[in-house]
Structures are given as structure tokens and as C-alpha cells.
């Protein structure tokens, strides 16, 4: 196959690197490419937004598949143009690309189809926008409706700050036409993560989770950038939240686009804000993120080329992905002054000290972004210059390797954040307070109700699968080690014979709560009896069958922990009050 990759950044270097590892590929072109892509492909002097020239080149060279990296050519309709000429292109159509190119389009889709997102409105009139700012109050977010290279978002701590951002767009024109329509939203709280998936318009196939760092300085200080680093996986998106992201965001979004008569093919990227048990969409992108692509593709063991072809051809349901269980991290090295004005042409030193791209994967790879080769030297040619990416046994190992490599590279004015990965390490270090164990992964739809409750109360948990009959040793080991890990309660969900809770209770002095799963022809009566009929001296608590039981088990676990935790006890008081208020509001709504 002959492949054309469109773009010139770190994402495109990572794509070229990954595609070059495919046995299906004979030749790769990259337009316009950079110094890094030149080592693995033939760079072509055509800019990414010159879509007519790119189509002519693809026709001339009989390109089998064109992979579009950046958002601008997608928003211009490059996929539509290529398809009109009988060429295959990986990415969404111009209409589908509005999910990124128009924030109000994306907002309308989410509101119409019940996809969770921040409340907000769009404005072209500055006086009306100011009144809305006064109405909702700070903190809030002011966004340019159109594309702004990842910089068109202002998180404003005060109303004055928001009005200044508004004025800079509507009156100052800092983003040109992209900022002539602005979106003003409530400011969501929580931790941000990236959820990226491939889709053919029907099937949605998730890629590894990742977390980007948008602010330019450590501790999330300073203005937004295109991204200063990323790691994968993102611990904030545990398996329960990943499942919810798929079921509440990704799949509904793809179905929504089809329902609107705009089938979406390619990469769907959801920027998510995670707060306790809540997931809300900050934004949609319609291409791979940069710098998320770099760590994600290092973890993707599957051949990317047939996956992209399947997205184009509508056959993604035939494929799965194989993911490296290790962690990866990318640190962006930037030019002094970025994301504001910066100089180009500085000589980059130290690249020869890093084991860079080769035929076999190394632990550390330097992906080029804003670079150029001149007189035998590699020089800076952009704001985000390099993406130093490392693979390690856990986030800490990947972090150490990436930063060790960064220390070897320099140029005049270069800088990088020193805290990429710190959030993940801090989250991983928190010991679990509740152990949740299921007899089978098929029990997850029920036991998810337990996990939602624990998330709501900010209680860290550990989840696993073990069977009382098939893997009794695993169940026993989990139970025996639970207290050492910091757990105070164990919750066990199982169906049919449901002996799991009893096995766990036999090997621990911690309280065990059993959740009978209604998975048999007896509608859970068998698992209920198996759970509650314990011999004297080996108690197991049981609170209900199925999803109500799973929810109650979560609440009971919180109550057990709250006996010696005054903060949790206060949260429980508020929880009870909120439930009562909800019932009272329903009662009031029935009044005449």
C-alpha cells in the first residue's frame, strides 16, 4: 500500500512512525511533514490546507489511503473532495467535522440527544453576552466557536476576566472569523481526561485513555496551549467510567450524527471533565489529539492501517485492539514565549544522545513537531517543538524516562512542564477503602451501581473478578490482602449459586456485603438464598437483589466507613437531605 499522511506536527510524526511498522505498507508520503517524518517517509512540499493540491498528488501517486492529521483540512472538506475523486481518506466529512469546527453545532447535538455537557449559550452581540456573564456569574468559560489551534478557550475566574476575553474575540478579533461567534458556559469542576475512539459510523472502538495538560506552566498555571504533555492510561478514567464514557458519550454521539443524516467516520475525541460520579463533555474533536497521539500509539500493539481502512469501509465490527499494558508519557518541549510570540531557527542540541526512531521500538522516542533541517542542523520551526515520549512499567517509570531524555536536549529559550504525570502518580498512591469483587465481568452492569455510589462519596476502590468455584484461590487472596491494602469493607456480587461472598467472609474479619445478581431463571432468588444462608460466625450482609442491592451495598459501605470518619458522616447527612428534597419536589409538582 501507498499511504499519504497530511500534517506536520508531532501527531503526524507519530502516525508516520506507527504506519511504517505495518507490513501492509510499501511507501509513505507526508505533506508537508517535518524533520522527524523525513526519516520514515518522503516529505511532500504541500501544506495541509491546500486540499486541491493534496488530491491531485494522491491521484498522481495512486495513493491507497490518505490519513488526515489536523482539523483544518477536515473542516475544509478534504475527505469529501477525495471521495469525489475516488480516493480513500480516513476522517470525517466536512459536515461531520462541525463537531469540532463549530462548538455551537456540537452543543446543539449534545443537548438534543442528551449527551452530558456544560450549560451555555452562544453570542455575536457583546452587550447580550455581557448580560449573560452577569447572569450566570464566575467562574465561567468563554470559547471561540470556530477552530483556534487549541487556544480559543478562556477559563475565567472573575466576570471582569470573562468580559476581557469576550472583548478580545468579538471586538479585538484575536481569532478572526473563528471568534466572531462565542460560546459562554458554566465552568465545570473536576479532572480532565481524553477519550478517543475509532468509528465507522456504526461501531465504536475505543483507544487507550489519556490525559492532556493544556496550561503552559506547572500546576496548570498560565494560558491554554495546544497541549504541553500527555500520558496513558489515565487513572481518573477507571474501567467503570470508561464504560460510562462509551455508553453515555461516544456511542450516543455517533448514533446522533447518523440520526442527523451526517454519519461520522474516523476519530472521535471527547474531552471529558470527571467529577466524582459525573462525566461531562468539554468539547469534541474529530481527529487524534496532539500530544495524546504519541503515548496512545506507543501503547497500541495492533496494526493501525487495517483499523483505519475499516473505518472508511464500514467494517470496524470485525476488529479489536491489542493494547500494551505498560504506561507511556509524552513531554512537550516548547520554544520560549509559547503560546505567545516566539523565535524560530534555534539549533537543537542533544538529539544524538537519545535513542530515537528506529526499526524496533525503544523505550524513549522523540517525536518532532516544530522542527526543520537546515545546513545539516536540526532547528526549531514552531512553538511546540518536540514530544519526548517514553514507555515504562507504570506512570512513574515512564515519567522518569521521559524527563531523563528531556534533560539531554536543549536550545536557546527551550522549556517544558516538570509535572506531567504528577496527577496520575498522586491518584495511584491513594489506597482503596472498599474492595469490589464480581463473580464474572457479566455482573458489571449491576455492580456499576455500587461504583457510582462510591464515586459520589469520593471513596477510592479496587475492583476485580474472581469466582468462588472457578478461581477460589484468587478470591481467597483478594480477601486476605484486603486489610493490608487499606480496605475497610468488601462488596461481592455474584449470581446463581453466589457463594463468592461467603468464601470472602471465611478469609477476612472485614465486613462483607453480598449483592445477589439476578442472572438466573429464578430471577436472583437462588443467589439471594446462597448469600444470606451463612453458617453461624461467618456473617454476610445482604441488602437487596440486583441493581437496588448494588446501590444499597455502596451506601451501606459508606455508612460503615462513616462510623469512624466524620467527613463521610457529614456527606451522608447531605445525601439523605438531597434524597428528601428530591421527593418533596416531586410531591410539590403534583399540586394544583
Image (cartoon, rainbow, N blue to C red):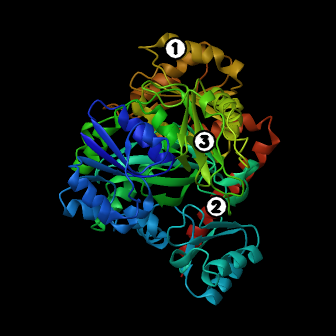
Residue under the image location 61 percent in, 34 percent down: 351
Which of the image's four quarters has the N terminus?
top left
Provide the secondary structure element on which disc 1 rests: helix
- In the image, which disc is placed on residue 240? none
- In the image, which disc is placed on residue 188? 2
What is the total number of numbered labels drawn onto the structure image?
Answer: 3
Q: Is 66 situated left or right of 425 in this image?
A: left
Q: Percent from the top left, x then y, of residue 535?
A: 56, 14
Mark 3–mark 2 Cα distance, whole angstroms, equals 16 Å
Crowding around mark 1 (Cα neighbors within 10 Å: few <14, some 14 to 19, many 20+) is: some
Q: Percent from the top left, x then y, of residue 321?
A: 36, 34
Q: Is residue 299 above or below residue 339?
A: above
- In the image, which disc is placed on residue 236? 3
Residue under the image location 53 percent in, 43 percent down: 368
Among the two numbered marks 3 and 1 on one chain, the one whose residue lies closer to the N terminus: 3
Provide the secondary structure element on which disc 3 rests: loop
Among the two numbered marks 3 and 2 on one chain, the one whose residue lies closer to the N terminus: 2
Q: Where does label 1 land, which residue?
A: 474
Q: Is 531 situated left or right of 47 in this image?
A: right
Residue under the image location 72 percent in, 78 percent down: 164
Q: Is 11 situated left or right of 582 in this image?
A: left
Whether label 3 touches label 2, CB < 8 Å: no
Q: Percent from the top left, x then y, of residue 179?
A: 56, 76
Taking depth in this image into account, of 174 and 254 the one nearest to the observer is 174
Q: Percent from the top left, x then y, of residue 518?
A: 40, 35
Crowding around mark 2 (Cα neighbors within 10 Å: few <14, some 14 to 19, many 20+) is: many
Q: Is residue 388 above or below residue 160?
A: above
Whether label 2 touches label 1, CB < 8 Å: no
Amino acid at each position: 500500500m501507498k499511504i499519504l499522511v497530511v500534517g506536520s506536527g508531532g501527531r503526524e510524526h507519530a502516525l508516520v512512525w506507527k504506519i511504517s511498522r505495518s507490513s501492509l505498507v510499501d511507501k509513505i508520503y507526508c505533506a508537508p511533514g517535518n524533520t522527524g517524518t523525513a526519516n520514515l517517509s518522503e516529505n511532500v512540499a504541500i501544506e495541509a490546507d491546500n486540499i486541491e493540491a493534496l488530491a491531485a498528488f494522491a491521484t498522481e501517486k495512486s495513493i491507497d489511503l490518505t490519513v488526515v492529521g489536523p482539523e483544518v483540512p477536515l473542516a475544509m472538506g478534504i475527505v469529501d473532495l477525495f471521495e469525489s475523486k475516488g480516493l480513500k481518506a480516513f476522517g470525517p466529512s466536512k459536515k461531520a467535522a462541525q463537531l469540532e469546527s463549530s462548538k455551537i453545532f456540537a452543543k446543539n447535538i449534545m443537548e438534543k440527544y442528551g449527551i452530558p455537557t456544560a450549560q451555555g449559550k452562544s453570542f455575536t452581540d457583546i452587550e447580550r453576552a455581557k448580560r449573560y456573564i452577569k447572569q450566570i456569574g464566575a467562574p465561567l468559560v468563554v470559547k471561540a466557536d470556530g477552530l483556534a489551534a487549541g487556544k480559543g478557550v478562556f477559563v475565567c475566574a472573575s466576570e471582569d476576566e470573562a468580559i476581557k476575553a469576550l472583548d478580545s474575540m468579538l471586538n479585538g478579533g484575536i481569532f478572526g472569523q473563528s471568534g466572531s461567534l462565542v460560546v459562554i458556559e458554566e465552568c465545570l469542576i473536576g479532572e480532565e481526561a481524553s477519550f478517543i475512539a475509532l468509528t465507522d459510523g456504526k461501531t465504536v472502538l475505543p483507544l487507550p485513555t489519556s490525559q492532556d495538560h493544556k496550561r503552559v506552566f506547572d500546576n496548570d498555571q498560565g494560558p491554554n496551549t495546544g497541549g504541553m504533555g500527555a500520558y496513558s492510561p489515565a487513572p481518573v478514567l477507571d474501567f467503570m467510567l470508561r464504560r460510562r464514557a462509551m455508553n453515555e458519550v461516544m456511542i450516543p454521539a455517533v448514533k446522533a450524527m447518523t440520526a442527523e443524516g451526517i454519519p461520522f467516520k474516523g476519530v472521535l475525541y471527547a474531552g471529558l471533565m470527571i467529577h466524582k460520579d459525573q462525566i461531562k463533555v468539554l468539547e469534541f474533536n474529530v481527529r487524534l489529539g496532539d500530544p495524546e497521539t504519541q503515548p496512545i500509539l506507543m501503547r497500541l500493539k495492533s496494526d493501525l492501517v487495517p483499523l483505519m481502512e475499516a473505518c472508511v469501509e464500514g467494517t470496524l465490527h470485525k476488529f479489536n485492539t491489542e493494547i500494551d499494558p505498560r504506561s507511556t508519557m509524552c513531554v512537550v518541549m516548547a520554544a520560549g514565549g509559547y503560546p505567545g510570540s516566539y523565535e524560530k531557527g534555534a539549533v537543537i542540541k542533544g538529539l544524538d544522545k537519545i535513542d530515537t526512531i528506529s526499526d524496533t521500538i525503544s523505550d524513549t522516542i522523540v517525536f518532532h513537531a516544530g522542527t526543520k533541517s537546515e545546513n545539516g542542523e536540526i532547528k526549531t520551526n514552531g512553538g511546540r517543538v518536540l514530544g519526548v515520549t517514553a514507555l515504562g512499567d507504570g506512570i512513574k517509570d515512564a515519567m522518569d524516562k521521559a524527563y531523563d531524555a528531556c534533560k539531554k536536549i536543549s536550545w536557546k529559550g527551550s522549556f517544558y512542564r516538570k509535572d506531567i504525570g504528577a496527577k496520575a502518580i498522586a491518584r495511584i498512591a491513594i489506597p482503596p477503602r472498599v474492595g469490589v469483587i464480581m463473580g464474572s465481568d457479566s455482573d458489571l452492569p449491576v455492580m456499576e451501581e455500587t461504583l457510582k455510589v462510591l464515586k459520589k462519596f469520593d471513596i477510592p476502590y479496587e475492583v476485580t473478578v474472581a469466582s468462588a468455584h472457578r478461581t477460589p484461590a484468587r478470591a481467597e487472596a483478594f480477601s486476605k490482602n484486603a486489610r493490608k491494602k487499606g480496605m475497610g469493607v468488601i462488596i461481592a456480587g455474584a449470581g446463581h449459586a453466589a457463594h463468592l461472598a461467603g468464601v470472602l467472609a471465611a478469609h477476612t474479619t472485614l465486613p462483607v456485603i453480598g449483592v445477589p445478581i439476578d442472572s438466573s431463571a429464578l430471577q436472583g432468588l437462588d443467589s439471594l438464598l446462597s448469600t444470606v444462608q451463612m453458617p453461624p460466625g461467618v456473617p454476610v450482609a445482604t441488602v437487596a437483589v440486583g441493581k437496588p442491592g448494588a446501590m444499597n451495598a455502596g451506601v451501606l459501605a459508606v455508612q460503615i466507613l462513616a462510623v469512624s470518619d466524620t467527613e463521610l458522616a457529614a456527606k451522608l447527612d447531605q445525601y439523605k437531605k438531597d434524597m428528601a428534597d428530591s421527593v418533596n419536589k416531586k410531591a410539590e409538582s403534583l399540586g394544583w
